[in-house]
Image: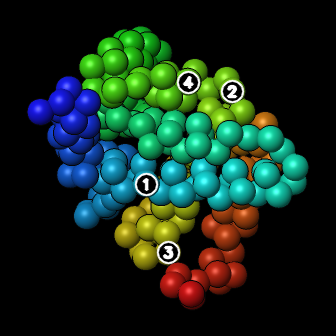
Amino acid sequence: MTERAARIVDTLIGLDPLAELPRTGWLLRGIRPCESIADHSYAVAVTVMLLVDALRAEGVEVDGEKALRMALVHDAPEAKTGDVPMPQKTKELSAALKAHEATIAERLLPDAAPFHEAARGESLEARIVKAADKIQMMTKALVYERQRRGDLHEFWMNEGNFEARGVDVAAEAFALLRARHADPGSWELGRW
């Protein structure tokens, strides 16, 4: 058996808990069942793909593969730490968790560079991933509210949930999400 094959299989085994681990923020608000971390990561990757396509259509040069790689592993360490919700993250806890997640990423991923770049949030691709992470979360909040699965008012009041990070199309998506939240009759689930 080759070392590269073992690394692939071991990485998949290491990431497997993400499929079962729920997004804690939804659980704390009584939403059961709720999306898993893997569900979230997949939806963030799709959001990144859509943002990259929109930016490219405007003539912006962006490395889509790099952005997708970051999106796919941005929460990878949560396979070991679980999903620590925002209200629990003090400044000190956030710093310690960030350092711990960096160590986990080094052990868990064959190439941890995409994780580290996403965590820094500096490059255009990393900023797209950060914005996509919030767009996905707020879209899920909108859908859960539409399904009458909980009151997620606090999500809409937190300005940090609408950080476009200098990505114009992300700002447009956030504006549309807010408009649809304000006027639930303006859209419907499953209209495709």
Q: Is residue 158 above or below residue 2?
A: below
152 or 138, which lies in front? Answer: 138
Q: Is residue 97 in sight in this rendering?
A: no
The answer to whether 104 appears left or right of 45 in the picture is left
Which mark is nearer the camera, 3 or 1? Answer: 1
Q: Is residue 1 left or right of residue 66?
A: left
Which residue is label 3 attached to? 146
Circle 1 sits in a helix, a strand or a loop, which is it? helix
Point out the tag, 4 or 3, that comes first from the N-terminus: 4
| Residue 102, x across and y down, in percent | 38, 17
| Callout 1 amino acid | Tyr
Q: Position of residue 16 (x, y in %)?
A: 21, 45
Q: Taking the image as drawn, is residue 30 in sight?
A: yes
Residue at image position (51%, 36%) is: 70
Amino acid marked by disc 3: Arg
Q: Residues under labels 3 and 1: Cα distance?
A: 21 Å
Does the residue at mark 4 contact the one at mark 2 (Cβ under 8 Å)?
A: yes
How much space separates mark 4 and mark 2, taking CA atoms? Answer: 8 Å
Q: Disc number at residue 123?
A: 2
- Pointer 1: what residue? 42
Tell which circle, 3 or 2, labels the residue nearer the N-terminal end.
2
- Outermost bottom residue: 191
Instruction: Check disc 1: other Cα within 10 Å, few if <14, some if 14-19, many if 20+.
Output: some
Q: Quadrant of the C terminus?
A: bottom right
Distance of label 1 from label 4 (alpha carbons): 18 Å
- Cα distance, mark 4 to mark 3? 35 Å
